[in-house]
Amino acid sequence: MSEKIATIEDVARHAGVSIATVSRALHKPDVVSETTREKVQTAIAATGYTANVMARNLRLNRSGMILLLVPDIGNPFFSAICQELKKAPARRAITF
């Protein structure tokens, strides 16, 4: 049987804080006290929590992916475009 994946609710329960506090500790650490931040980090380590990027993207209604349709991937021109897109850092405009 597979092991249950830790959720942010599990972290909150383990740290004794609210889900909102866990979220703030992860995304706006300057808003949370040092002791609370340490409790949350300890709970994260104990539960093995990792953020579920797919769930976050679904909630935010974005994926950060692009669709590229090319007529022939074997054509060196289209192949070169695909390679440049792969190399480009995220959130950067690419012009051709």
Image (cartoon, grey):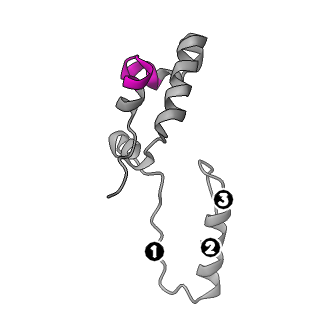
Any mark on residue 88, and which? 3
Q: Quadrant of residue 15?
A: top left
The CA distance from mark 1 to mark 2 is 11 Å
Quarter of the image containing the N terminus? Answer: bottom left
Label 2 amino acid? Ile
Q: Quadrant of residue 23?
A: top left
Q: Secondary structure at mark 3?
A: loop
Q: Is residue 65 above or below residue 74?
A: above
- Of the two numbered discs 3 and 2 in the rendering, the one whose residue sits closer to the viewer: 3
Say few, some or many: other residues with alpha carbon within 10 Å of mark 1 (under 14 / 14 to 19 / 20 or more).
few
Q: Secondary structure at mark 1?
A: loop
Dominant SS in magenta: helix
Q: Quadrant of residue 83?
A: bottom right
Q: Nearer the viewer, residue 36 or 20?
A: 36
**Residue drawn at point x = 45 percent, y = 74 percent:** 69
Q: Do the residues bearing badges 3 and 1 touch, measured as CB atoms within 8 Å?
A: no
* Residue extending furthest toward the front: 1
Q: Magenta residues, as a range?
A: 12-23
Any mark on residue 69, and which? 1
Which residue corresponds to mark 2? Answer: 81
Choose the circle earlier in sequence order: 3 or 2: 2
The CA distance from mark 3 to mark 1 is 18 Å
- Of the two numbered discs 3 and 1 in the rendering, the one whose residue sits closer to the viewer: 3
The spot of residue 95 in percent (x, y) is 64, 60
The spot of residue 19 in percent (x, y) is 37, 23
Q: Secondary structure at mark 2?
A: helix
